[in-house]
Amino acid sequence: MSALLEVGGLAAGFGTAPDVLAGVDLTVERGEFVSVLGPSGCGKSTILNCTAGLLVPRAGRVVFDGRPVEGVNTGVGYMTQDDTLLPWRRIADNVALPLRMRRVPKGEIGPLVERYLTLLDLRDAAQLYPAQLSGGMKRRALLARSMIYEPELLLMDEPFAALDAQLRAQMHAELRRTVRETGVTVLFVTHDIGEAVALSDRVVVVGGPRPSGIVHEQAIPFGTDREMETLRFHPDFAALE
Ligand code: ADP
Ligand code: MG
């Protein structure tokens, strides 16, 4: 079976400005957790936007599940850095929104909302409004909303960057558990190397002189001394020592 996502020779840019990305090659296998790591402005979000079909590449190809991406890719979930919960809707309604937009029958919506609120430990927040939630709960609600239509691939764009270290560590644990329980494939963007190492099967480093390309690719050596050395300095694991 082919990879879930195959990006080849991707070039992208905006207006008359020079390309932001050139020749980006990236493959994500089913069930993999891959992080794209790179400095701010190198084009990480642009890669995700091309994958989601929100931006048309200038060159190259994006093949999802064996088919070229043309227009909005409905097979992906997309969790951005921004708080895009609708303030006037209760959490359960916010989380149900993608299903309602896809015209899923009413009778199927309730059980799915229940399942994803439970999965992300949000059952007590179902009837609250976003303003009544903590930062971590809002992140969990956004994660529930981007997973509820059970996308095969979940795109996450620096989803925890706005959280303090303790909350971020908690969210990492929640995300690892959620990925384990659902088997979802994840393409995760971050500029934090510790976060990339803590979460991923494989890290792809983007950057270099403009336009950006892939500069390095590293499988995370789980269980090795080097991994342990790296994790020692990561807030998720510091508490375990
Ligand atoms: P990253 O996510 O790695 O921080 P982005 O993919 O958001 O980087 O942006 C890469 C470059 O493209 C930046 O220089 C940014 O200013 C530019 N850029 C991003 N989006 C747009 C846009 N809609 N219009 C014009 N320039 C953009
Ligand atoms: Mg970005």
Image (cartoon, rainbow, N blue to C red):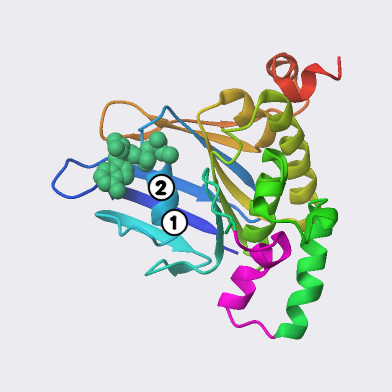
Q: Tag 2: Cα neighbours inside 10 Å, few (<14), some, or many (≥20)?
A: many
Question: Can I make out residue 21 in this image?
Answer: no
Residue 162 against residue 155 in the figure, above or below? above
Which of the 4 quarters of the picture holds residue 19? top left
Name the foreground residue: 163 vs 7: 163
Q: Is residue 86 magenta?
A: no
Assess mark 2: CB under 8 A from ligand 1?
A: yes
State the quadrant of the N terminus.
Answer: bottom right
Marks 1,2: beta carbons within 8 A? yes
Left or right of residue 71, residue 149 in this image: right
Q: Residue at x 78, y 17 (%)?
A: 238
Q: Quadrant of ligand 2?
A: top left
User: Residue 7 at what x, y percent from top left?
Assistant: 42, 52
Q: Residue at x 72, y 21 (%)?
A: 235
Instruction: Tell me the kind of residue under disc 2.
Output: Ile
Asked which secondary structure carries label 2, the reply is: helix
Q: Which residue is mark 2?
A: 47
Q: Which mark is residue 51?
A: 1
Which of the 4 quarters of the picture holds residue 146? bottom right
Give, as a single range, the part of the protein colored magenta: 88-105
Assess mark 1: CB under 8 A from ligand 1?
A: no
